[in-house]
Image (cartoon, grey):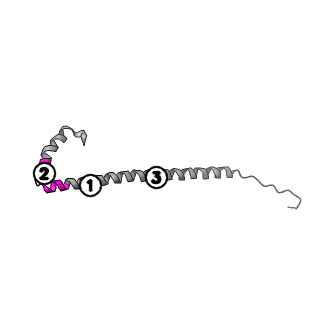
Amino acid sequence: MSDTEPVVVAERSASGAFIAAVVIAVLFAVGGLVWCYSLQNHIAATDAKLADADKKNATLADQLGSDPGAVERHHRDVEPERRRHPEAD
């Protein structure tokens, strides 16, 4: 090759594909962050409901534990009602 011959540089056609791949990767990353944030909020709400249920269970256990006949009355009074309306559970 001599010094007088022009040097031809071929353009890269892969740069457009690379930019598209980067844009898609960024969109997936942002989507993943939004999804994680929504899961975090869902878990926080579920944890709050679980804490409320635990408090209610503790209160009911205290009430049932303080009265020896309470469990039997509960089964006698509540269970027939559940059999009549099973969709309420």
* Mark 1 or mark 3, earlier in chain: 3
The foreground one among 5 and 27 is 27
Q: Which residue is mark 1?
A: 55
Magenta residue check for 72: yes
The residues tagged by marks 1 and 3 sit, at their Cα atoms, a distance apart of 27 Å
Q: Amino acid at mark 2?
A: Ala
Residue count near mark 2 (Cα–Cα under 10 Å), binned few <14, some 14–19, many ≥20:
few
Q: Amino acid at mark 3?
A: Tyr
Image quadrant for the C terminus? top left
Give the residue displayed 20% in from the left and 53% down from the top.
Answer: 60
Q: How many marks overall?
A: 3
Magenta residue check for 82: no
The residues tagged by marks 2 and 3 sit, at their Cα atoms, a distance apart of 44 Å
Residue count near mark 3 (Cα–Cα under 10 Å), binned few <14, some 14–19, many ≥20:
few
User: Percent x, y for residue 57?
Assistant: 23, 53
Q: Amino acid at mark 1?
A: Lys
Give the residue displayed 67% in from the left and 49% down from the top.
Answer: 16
Tell me the quarter of the picture where residue 7 sits.
bottom right
The foreground one among 58 and 75 is 58
Farthest right residue?
A: 4
Q: Which residue is mark 2?
A: 70
User: Percent x, y for residue 51?
Assistant: 31, 55
Secondary structure, mark 3, is helix
Q: Which residue is mark 3?
A: 37
* Mark 2 or mark 3, earlier in chain: 3
Secondary structure, mark 1, is helix
* Residue contact at pointers 1 and 3, CB within 8 angstroms: no
